[in-house]
Image (spheres, rainbow, N blue to C red):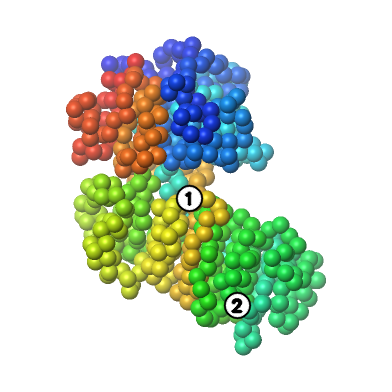
Amino acid sequence: MSDKLEAYKKAEGPIPPTYRRWHLYDAGLENLGDNDQPAEVPTPEPGPDELLVRHDACGLCFSDIKVIRLGEDHPRIYRNMRENPVVLGHEIAMTVVRVGEKLRQKYHPGDRFTIQADIFVDGVGYAYGYEIQGGLSQYNIIDQRILNGDDGNYLIPVKPTTGYAESALTEPWACVTAAYELSYRTHLKPGGVTWIIGTHADPNQTYSLSAGFDAGSHPDHLLLTDTPSYLADALKARAAELGVQVSEVADVSAPPVEFVDDIILLGATADLIERVSPWLNHFGIVAILADGPLDRPVQVDIGRVHYNRWLYVGARSGEITDAYANIPVRSSLKPGGKAWFVGAGGPMGRMHVQRAIQKANGPQTIVCTDVSDHRLQAVENSFGEEARAKGIDFICLNPMHREVYEAGMAPFKEQGFDDIIVLAPIPPVIADAANWLAPEGVMNIFAGVARGTTAPLDLSELYLKDVRFIGHSASSIDDLRLMLHETESGELSPNRSVAAIGSLSAAKEGLKAVQDQRFPGKVVIYPNIKEFPLTALPDLKDILPEVYAKLKNGREWTNEAEEAFLRIMLP
């Protein structure tokens, strides 16, 4: 049997004339599959500059559920799904099985890869598992869109000793890693559009701009609304020297541009912030210069904080650059600090918690909250002992049990949290959690909510307490390479995220399980094994005891367990 596994690893076996894949024909789980089964289609031959790959493992993601819910309305889908169905799956481990003649010097059967799913060609997205056929299929063609896209080659080489599940799960793990590597501008955007609004300027304050508007770096277009005359005159004179276009804007609801990169508010009200924010460009910044609290919380578009990377900053002085640079935006967890993971029991939440425990110089206190006792207990079982052995104060609380929850959170009411990672896409939850930030604390809105979704946030704390609200979506090729390195070096283990496994036929049930949040971790599908139902890892004890024996602590997937599983399940 071991020879069969070795032959599989080396891609030495015959390739069947047909293979199976799941077709999604429209929105709704009822439109997934052909009579609730994967379809059988001819196995293609790679062209001269193409590869034929075998999908070895595919992680299921809540992003797949978003495609199922939205169908052709999903922003990454732009085709007739009835005529050309989508094949989901973007968390992939793959092996090359055939190589086109022009690529035979570079690629060979048995070469292993994972893939950065966000593929762009000439600025157009062809995401793997969206526009390009994904991992819920046994085989696929890798063409020049993937091998030679806008960012180069989207395939990331994987070592032969790396497990299939752990290499597939480097994709979601890379998104987690990227959340702590975010960087933001500390100055006006060069070549961009800057808008300075002084409608609520303090007459006793002197406003200035000491950097970012000179020969070395400056915007190309300056908008001015009710700007104090001394500042407006100085900026206009400088703009004339630099060739910067200047526009006076009387109505803040109708600036003469499509987007603005920097909006500077010399004093502000919540209403003004809400009126001007929609003009922000991707990666846009709103800087508020004020010395007192705003009149009310601001309805902040948290969807765009997450997806568009909008940033709000502030300062109590009249110097505009202070709002950008005095308190740099920190995205890494504060060493020795207090971190709260809101919605910690889901698959992504567990990854964040695991990383916080395993990475060097992590927080001293970790609070995990979730509304599911089952998922919260799984977090405790997986990480509690390990965290406490490292001297971390590790606390799990369910907000549905109010008395216990309030008692557990009471010590943090005054001091607050240095980091709050929000993994629950629920605006009231996000708004409530924001009230617990410590001075210079950072809230990372990791959970994706739709653009246009707002939550009331007290933006006065940007300059009164120097807090920051940041957001994140997806990962880059470099993020994926970094995560794969951390996986293969043993620094982080994606295998610990696996909660259930199954064959290709089990994928539909697996997606239902993701939708219903049935498991406290990831579902991994092995497309090329014999029929095997969706199975939680603890249930292997009765079904495949020889595989169960190789789990860590009877609940965590390992490469040894995967090999034992494949020795039994490969056809």
Question: How far is mark 2 from mark 1, CA to CA?
Answer: 31 Å
Q: Nearer the viewer, residue 98 or 34?
A: 34
Q: Quadrant of the N terminus?
A: top left
Residue found farthest to the bottom: 204
Q: Position of residue 222 (x, y in %)?
A: 73, 67
| Picture quadrant where residue 276 is located | bottom right
> Residue 13: which disc?
none
Residue type beneath disc 2: Gly
| Picture quadrant where residue 72 is located | top right
Q: Which residue: 52% across, 59% down?
A: 454
Q: Is residue 254 above or below residue 225?
A: above
> Residue 448: which disc?
1
Going from N to C along the chain, the mark reached first, 2 or 1, is 2
| Picture quadrant where residue 502 is located | top left
Q: Position of residue 73 (x, y in %)?
A: 58, 39
Q: Is residue 460 above or below residue 51?
A: below
Query: Disc 2 vs disc 1: Cβ atoms closer than 8 Å?
Result: no
Q: Which residue: 26% across, 25% down?
A: 564
Q: Position of residue 125 (x, y in %)?
A: 61, 38
Q: Quadrant of the C terminus?
A: top left
Q: Nearer the viewer, residue 191 or 548?
A: 548
Q: Which residue: 28% across, 34% down?
A: 536
Q: Is residue 420 above or below residue 17?
A: below
Left or right of residue 178: residue 493: left
Q: Is residue 422 above or below residue 314?
A: above
Instruction: Give the structural element (helix, strand or loop) at label 2.
Output: loop
> Residue 267: which disc?
2
Residue 465 seen by the camera: yes
